[in-house]
Amino acid sequence: MTKETILIVDDEEDIIELIQYNLKTEGYSILTARTGEQAVKIAEQSGPDLMVLDLMLPGMDGFEVTRHLRSRERTQDMPIVILTAKGEESDIVTGLELGANDYISKPFSPKVLTARIRAILRRRKKESESVSINVRQEGDLVIDRTRHMVTLEGRSLELTLSEFELLAFLADKKGWVFTRGQIVDAIRGENYAVTERSIDVVIVGLRKKLKHYAEVIETVRGVGYRFKE
């Protein structure tokens, strides 16, 4: 069975060859680009299923590429995995805020990168097969959007509106990392205020109510939060 097409964007030939070899072994079709301008052109013309994007590129850098692709209808939903220098937390946050779906720090493990790509594409396929998922279940934890209710081991949890929306948002994108800013944008309502600083407070309260299930909400140091895969 033919697998998805991955666009690899990096100005280092050895990095491209390393990623390409590992992804081809998994059966993926590969496209490559060495500049941001080439990446944008290929993405708009070929519509790959996912892009692996280095941030440090000559000319148009990875941030500009992400911003541009997210502003175009054909590429606005294309998954992007950014490659960044190890420890550059500010770059990771900026990339995610601009619309990247995940990140890998250099130096990286090809196996980990391949696993991340596989997970993203699998989630994307599931989402496309189901237009709306009103009830999500993770073990004994059930999130019911229709009834606006969360139950744990059969018992209803008394969550605030912010806690419910935050939990439901992260669960809908299980495994994806979101910055505090992205979470604010997703859960903010007209009748209540949520700030980046208060997100940490909401997380603390939510974890207390989830008790031994608190670990489903993972902290990604220097970046934000995600729902555990």
Image (tube, rainbow, N blue to C red):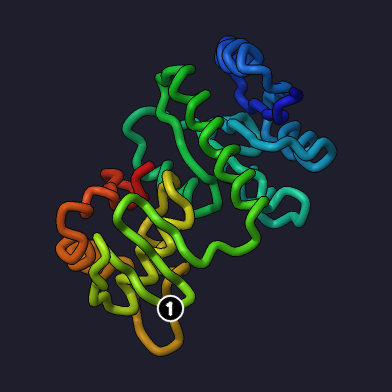
Give percent across and percent down for residue 133: 55, 62
Q: Farthest front residue?
A: 154
| Neighbourhood count class around disc 1 (C-alpha, 10 Å): few under 14, some 14–19, many 20 upward | few
Q: How many marks?
A: 1
In depth, the one of 156 and 173 nearer the eye is: 156
The residue at 35%/82% (across/down) is: 193
Up/down of 36 relative to 13, above or below:
below
Query: The residue tagged with tag 1: helix, strand or loop?
Result: loop
Q: Residue at x 33, y 69 (%)?
A: 150
Residue at position x 48%, y 41% from top? 102
Picture layout, residue 206 above or below residue 14? below
In the image, 220 versus 42, the foreground residue is 220
Q: Is any part of residue 111 visible from this angle?
A: yes
The three-letter amino acid code for the residue at tag 1 is Arg
Outermost residue on the bottom side: it is 191
Residue bearing mark 1: 147
**Image coords of residue 98 (percent x, y):** 54, 53
Q: 48 or 59: nearer the eye? A: 48
Percent of width and height locating residue 117:
55, 31
Residue at 33% over, 79% down = 161
Q: Is residue 16 visible?
A: no
Image quadrant assignment for residue 16:
top right
Image-based side of 176 in relation to 86, left or right: right
Q: Nearer the viewer, residue 141 or 210?
A: 141
Q: x, y (%) of residue 81?
A: 54, 36
| The quadrant where residue 228 appears | top left
Above or below: residue 2 compared with residue 161: above
